[in-house]
Amino acid sequence: MNWKKRTAKCGELNKEQVGKSYVLNGWISSVRNMGGLIFIDLRDRYGIMQLVIEPENNAELAEKAKELKSEYVIWCEGKLRLRTSPNPKLPTGYVELLLDNYGVINKSELPPFEIADDIETNEEIKLRYRYLDLRRHSLQKNFIIRNRVYQTMHTFFDEKGFLEIETPILMKSTPEGARDFLVPSRINKGKFYALPQSPQIFKQILMVSGFDKYIQIAKCFRDEDLRSDRQPEFTQIDIEMSFVEKEDIFELIEEFIAKLWKNVLNIDVKRPFKKMKYQEAMERFGSDKPDLRFGMEIVDITEDMKNCEFKVFSEVIANNGRIALINAKNAAHYSRKQIDMLTEFAKKYGAKGLAYIKYDKGEINSPIAKFLTKEELDSITEKANAQDGDLILISSDEKERALIILGALRLEMAKQLGIIEKVKDDFSFHWVVDFPLFEYDEEEKRYVAMHHPFTAPKSEDMEFIDTNPEKLSAQAYDLVVNGAELGGGSVRIHENDIQQKIFKLIGLKEEEAEEKFGYLLKALKFGAPPHAGIALGLDRIVMMLAKTENIRDVIAFPKTTSGISIMDGAPSEVDEKQLKELHICLIKKEV
RNA sequence: GGAGCUGUAGCUCAGUUUGGUUAGAGCGCCUGCCUGUCACGCAGGAGGCCGCGAGUUCGAGUCUCGUCAGCUCCGCCA
């Protein structure tokens, strides 16, 4: 070994250790050569230590130190002393290491960007040099949080008697849900494994086996388009329990979440969490994951407009649609152009247009006012609780569409008006419950499970199962924090006949159900206990704790929005030989 | 599958509206000076396929079309 091993870490030394000698290892963060005095900032993951060379007392070392550049890895030794001019901004700012000697362990090319917290660099270069980006404290701290989450989880669930059990990564492709990633089998030519979208069926089967409390940090894979909070591979804290009801899951998860927030942020979370029905979430907030940190709730005015002369409204009413509004307080100053942009925004969610009323300096300013009677206008003003200075945005559409549009506008206006900024340090935890069991898929012309097809219907709704399936509510629940879905789960079906019925309702023929899910159906015949569970999005939890808007900030090696890993170049073409072994031949793209 | 924004020095960006001499700034980098810096300071210097390809034009960083990449969003994501 031609370097000296560290006896301390950069961020750990302080006043208490002054007078002692240490060896440090780390990366050169910056060199400030004052001529008669050389300062070097040495960085490791624990912090920064200032090194000093005094040319007056060690001319040789000072001369040698001219070789030192950013991001060289060095070892160095010297005595810790108090600084004559301390820097209170640094945790280690009261001390410095007076060097007796140092050595370069490994040189570095000039990095393509500076390794500093406060500089912006384009995403592509940061991802190409991910190892350099990951040297920044601003990113490292997220992985320290992530680790805190792992450790809290392991301890918490171990103490509760949960068993951590791994489930297969290579499994059978399932027809429901997201697009599968497929893995060809060499031994079984022409056949494919799929990567799990979640370990759902395996964990249910573990319940049948009697492992009544299961947990796993599960890697999941979904071949769908990416978003700022979605990667094709992501991590779930996957949980399942036997002989429980949904309340048991609520209590367990609330306790766990409270522990996480305490351990990571030292915040005391108020329990129990609020519960809101899906229907209510949609009606009041236009979302199944409402952000409850602020108001601006949706107001239904369909009834008030039932005799309205305005054709847009009357047609919507005739088609059983919804006319509703939100009141953007103090936004009457919005210009025509700004409102046009809001209209464009609404159109992304399928709006045909957007009506508005400005209560501007005592006057009502609205292109639709002339179509409304005084009574109609008054009732809008009253229901919206509109005052001078307010801007009312009105959506009229098919019911769910209208609500979704207003839900999106509500969030957008909260952003634009600085409301989100005001509540950015608040946390609002709640459960959304009583989801519909099915929703109708227009494209496939069939019912699909809103959660997944193993979700139990509410027992009091079972009477509708043969007559009116769209009326069925699911025993499903989502954990929602600040408008983000951090997890979701359900009470599962543990009876073979009900499971078969559900498959039938989503359009799976008996043979298909047998072919795709036969192993689950069979397992349910062998004394399956009642069971329920949940999956928490670990990446999103870390995002929330780290207060970052982007999932790339909490995944060590993430992919770009087109699913590419720039650093290693995945996905890539493969050798003809590899394809041949797999009996795969590529279709040449036509030009 | 669709929409929007962005692409100019190693990095961050200006210049594009209205085409016209040698494409600028800050940071970083290189050389020298500097004894308390920590966003060190001072002096000097190097550094450009204006994403790529066509087109319009006497002339394109600037206009048009195409294309690629990154980001954000809609669809999609049980």
Image (tube, rainbow, N blue to C red):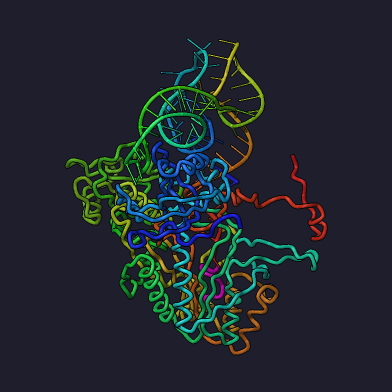
Find the residue positioned furthest to the front.
A57
**Residue at 59% across, 70% down:** A506
Q: Is residue A453 magenta?
A: yes
Q: Position of residue A75 (x, y in %)?
A: 51, 53
Q: Position of residue A158 (x, y in %)?
A: 48, 80
**Residue at 30% across, 40% down:** A367
- A468 with respect to A330 (left or right): right
- A172 with respect to A74 (left or right): right
- Residues in magenta? A449-455
Q: Is residue B77 above or below residue A513?
A: above
Q: Is residue A125 magenta?
A: no
Q: Position of residue A545 (x, y in %)?
A: 40, 62
Q: Determine if residue A314 is in view.
A: no
Find the residue positioned furthest to the left.
A362
Q: Foreground: A518 or A394?
A: A518
Q: Main secondary structure of the magenta part?
A: loop
Q: Determine if residue A436 is in view.
A: yes
Q: Position of residue B42 (x, y in %)?
A: 37, 27
**Image quarter hosting the N terminus of chain A:** bottom right
